[in-house]
Image (cartoon, rainbow, N blue to C red):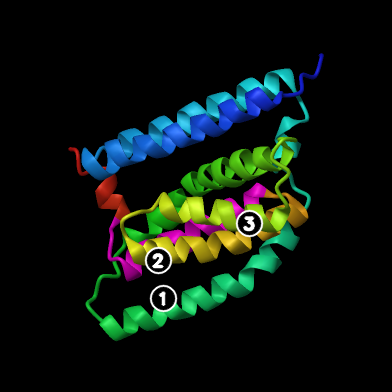
Amino acid sequence: MQIHTISDRGRWFEIYAVVITGIAKYILVDWLEFRLFYISGAIMFWVWYILSRYHTNRQILINWGFRREGFLETFKFCIPFVIFALIIIGFYELGVGDGFLEWSLLPILGLYPIWGLIQQFLMIGIIAGNLKEIQSLKFKEKHLVLIVSLLFSLAHFPDYRLMGFTFMMELFFISAYFRWKNLWALGVLHGWLGGMFLYLVLHRNLWQELWVVF
């Protein structure tokens, strides 16, 4: 099978598609509260796109970071930040002590890594990866770490606590990606850490939010 490389125009198309996905979040989730519809639709679209690209380029999954190599290295690099963040989250929950901890945290921690993986694929595999490869831009990795972390933070506007948290988290995640290029570890850590932060700090029950439209 012939392997097709993507042009700079194709890279910009992917970036614009991610931007549209982000805009749709503000409309469908923040405004209309169609969280389940948005998340399931976004996952299905991007899984379809990944499979479509894989059909013409068998190397693309590895290029994006869907591979076994680098999983442990990425995990070990990010785990100090994860542990520190979990300690802060734990002390916050103990200090508040309002009994928000419920059984619904379990399905969140089980399912949220899927959505976390897609988010990391979009922000790092697509945006950071393409900006790095577009020849006319000539971004250095340290610049991309800051730019994409800021973009990921802005995607969580207007909650400033969540914006600050996601900015710090993405700084570590993108740095790890540029070293070992493994999305699986980032997706798992994003799901677990993000789920804990949303649940215990922001007191958002994501499980209930999924079904709010019903």
Q: Is residue 200 magenta?
A: yes
Q: Is residue 80 or residue 103 the one in the foreground?
A: 80
Q: Is residue 56 above or below residue 163?
A: above
Residue at which label 3 appears: 145
- Mark 2 and mark 3 lie on one chain; the one further toward the N terminus is 3
* Badge 1: residue crowd in 10 Å (few <14, some 14–19, many ≥20): some
**In this picture, residue 88 sits left or right of residue 98:** right
**Residue sitting at the far right:** 2
- Mark 2 and mark 1 lie on one chain; the one further toward the N terminus is 1
> Which numbered mark, 3 or 1, is in the foreground of this view?
3
Residue name at image x 21 percent, y 38 percent: 32
Q: Amino acid at mark 1?
A: Ile
Residue name at image x 76 percent, y 56 percent: 179
Q: Quadrant of the N terminus?
A: top right
Residue 89: image tag: 1
Would you identify the image quadrant in which residue 65 lies?
Answer: top right
Percent across and percent down for residue 202 are 30, 66
Residue 197: image tag: 2
